[in-house]
Image (spheres, helix red, strand yellow):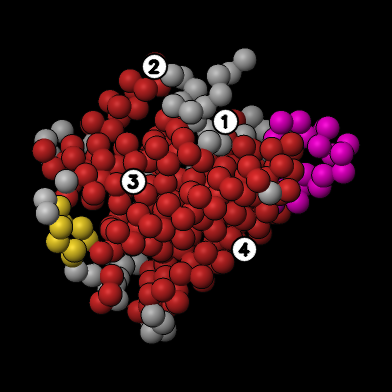
Amino acid sequence: MTIIFDGIAFGMLLFLISVGLSVTLGLMNFVNLAHGVFAMVGGYVCVVLLNDWGLPFLATIPFAIVVPGVLGVVLERLLYRRLYEASALDQVLFSLGLVFMAVAATHYFFGARQQPLHLPDFLTGQIHLPGVDIGVYRLFLVVAGLIVAALLQWSVIRTPFGARLRAAVDNQGTARGLGIDVNRVFMLTFALGSALAGLGGALGVEMLGLDPEFPVKYLVYFLIVVTVGGGGNILGSLWAALLLGVADVAGKYYVPQVGAFIIYAIMVVILILRPQGLFGRPHH
């Protein structure tokens, strides 16, 4: 049970970071492999404010959300916007270039070491229940993930912004004809995706570690969550992240010599059976 719960917590973390990528990749059809960079920025903002400025952990979280969000807007305005019509390969090469630039810049400013993060006392310790030990911090991650999932699903389905976004994605020309400012919708969507990545990055420092290689190390995980869940499907990403989180933690615990093999095996099987992902719409 403890392993399953740890897996769920890890899955929630993957979900928090990946769901922004699911939004940009699935809804905007933009292959942004630099998504992990925004998570890393959120993590570093959190660590610097905590360790160097002495802010309490929870007080650093809004900054870890806002800074990557603003960075997302700036990059979208200056760079990404020029590549919306480009081929997927161009987008991949461009965003990979950004990843390696970010890794090099982080190395330069922060050095190569893992960043230390001391959680506040109220997030450490364990809750002992019959048959399961629940880490308080992992419980906190699960709750945070569920809240974000619920809010996102609601905003995409129930709000005017969500309606505009879906319209802009389905048919840009028609959306513009209806008076929707497609550029603005895409910019806000990008900011949202980047801000969510920052949140996941900050909350995940304790579990995932934080060093300049972060965006490269976890890139495959984020991509697996999005492909297995079905691009642009928030609940799909949630289920996929939970499935992968539990499989990864259980796999590394029970058959450590196999390591991450299990995750890739699951991904291959699911994509053979359902190429559009678990919850994706079939391609017509």
Distance (Cα) linking label 1 and label 2: 23 Å
Q: Residue at x 53, y 36 (%)?
A: 233
Give the CA separation, mark 3 to mark 4. Answer: 26 Å
Comparing labels 4 and 1, the label whose residue is closer to the camera: 4
Residue 92 visible at all: no
At a point 33% along the width and 20% down the height, the residue shown is: 269
Q: Is residue 177 magenta?
A: yes
Q: Is residue 2 left or right of residue 211?
A: left
Q: Secondary structure at mark 3?
A: helix
Give the label on residue 70, or none.
4
Considering the image in quadrants, where does the C terminus appear? top right
Q: Point out which mark residue 272 bears.
A: 2
- Comes first in the chain, label 3 or label 1: 3
- Disc 3 versus disc 4: nearer the observer: 3
Q: Residues within 10 Å of mark 3 (few under 14, many from 20)?
A: many
Give left or right: position of 157 versus 95. Answer: right
